[in-house]
Amino acid sequence: MEHLELDVALLDLDCSNPRHDEVDDQSTALAALIVNQGQKIANLALDIHRNGLSPAHRFIVIKETIGRYTVLDGNRRLAALRILSDPEILPVAYRPAMFIEKASARGNQPNRVSCSLMPDREAAAVWLERTHTGQLDGVGVIPWSPVAQHRFRPKARRTQTSSAVAVLDWLRKRTTDETRLRHISRVEEDASTNLGRLVTDKKVRELIGFRFEGHEIIADAPEEDLDRRFSAMVADLSQERAVTDLTHRKDREDHIRHLLGDDLYLENTDEQLGLGGAATAADKTAPSKTRSAEKEEAQPTSTAPQTPTGRTPRRIAPRLFHGLVLPGLHSRTRTIISELQQLDLGRFPNAAAVLLRSAVELSVVEYLEAAGKDLDTMPKLATRIQKAIDHLQTSKDRNRYHGIKTELGKANSLLAAQNLNQYVHNLHHPPLPTELETISTRYSVLLEDISAALSTTNSP
């Protein structure tokens, strides 16, 4: 590759430009590109006229004719320069207001441009692919996310994006935990729109326990509770399976109620949730009061007959391994899984995490022992899970455990046994219901097959 400064007059449009069908000559190539781009080419021309060419992008060229260079990357820019040299060649249908006058005035369009000379089309193809065919898992050009765009040029008024950024920054300042930081980064890149939709919803803010003053978050709930609820939201949105349709207000409210379960700011006092102190038996039995209900009680009592109002039934909190029946496992293992299935994730996430890991480990160990495997040669749970999957796959669809096997190989996945162990023992990152649900869902298939295999082995 050679870098050159070339006269614009020496450059030719690519008659084989992928943006349009192959053509025979330069005038047809220019006409085809104008039709393909429409008014965009006029806007680009005016931008170059005003600001010049971007210093970040060279033209990629090859020599196909003696003394001339064919542009393989930069055809739009070259077409814009052609138009600036003769604005009348742009059809009237594609001209913005006052285009001729603006383009004819003195501007910044250059006569010479920076180019990278490639030996042939094949050598240039790798760079064209990286520029024009998407992100390519990080190899190609990655556009800024809405959050990155906001950080580059923040708006004065609060928007969905700036609201999402406020929540993510609030969380980031309060943690050094790698798992939580990964969740924050994933949401920044892929799910900031949904987070923004949620936290700009007044009802959602009431359920979580905070409000905005400008771009600042003001906590109404204790900070540790707000931290837990924000973390649950971000962890949920960081998952591939996270809900994507939060356009309607009812959907947003339902999503938060389902996600947080009993851990809602307005519907329960901290004492009743076991978050701020011990509640009495009477407190636990009596329905809790919202702030609005407390305000109503403070008003003068009306003599008019009152219409009784009932509380909206609370959505049942999610359970792990829900409905899973495993008759082939040892009675002790079944008991642990049965207790796990009864736990309310919103109230007992730590107990659920410990029992979840125990259920997976006990089931795998029981299966490997029945298969005659030497556990001393595989002290790590990750190795044992992999060995159990490999052994089961001899009679199963090879794609049946694809989800688990894929995650076992990822350094940051909570489904990987080593990370699951660290997750359970991490003092700085409380287990989150959405993460536990994901682990439970993926491992359910494995536990079902282990139970079935043990039932066959133990049958008379």
Image: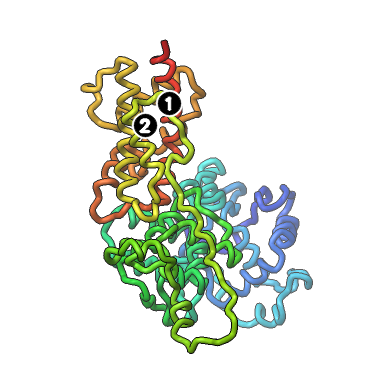
Report the quarter where the C terminus lies.
top left
Q: What residue is at 77 percent from the left and 69 percent from the top?
A: 91
As shown in the figure, which amino acid type bears the numbered disc 2?
Answer: Arg
Q: Position of residue 420 (x, y in %)?
A: 31, 42
Q: Position of residue 415 (x, y in %)?
A: 37, 40
Q: What secondary structure is found at the residue carrying circle 1?
A: loop
Q: What residue is at 46 percent from the left and 57 percent from the top?
A: 259
Q: Residue furthest right?
A: 92
- Along the line of sight, the residue nearer the viewer: 193 or 368: 368
In the figure, residue 378 lies in which quadrant?
Answer: top left
Q: Residue furthest bottom?
A: 300
- Along the line of sight, the residue nearer the viewer: 148 or 290: 290
Q: Label 1: few (<14), some or many (≥20) within 10 Å?
A: few
- Along the line of sight, the residue nearer the viewer: 333 or 42: 333
Is 260 displayed left or right of 273 in the figure?
Answer: right
Task: Give the residue at mark 1.
Answer: 327
Check if mark 2's residue and mark 1's residue have beta carbons within 8 Å: yes
Q: Position of residue 282 (x, y in %)?
A: 35, 64
As shown in the figure, which amino acid type bears the numbered disc 1?
Answer: Pro
**Figure check: 137 above or below 90:** above
Q: What residue is at 40 percent from the left and 67 percent from the top?
A: 268
**Labelled disc at residue 334:** 2
**Labelled disc at residue 412:** none
- Along the line of sight, the residue nearer the viewer: 189 or 201: 201
Residue 90, visible in the rendered structure: yes
The count of marks equals 2
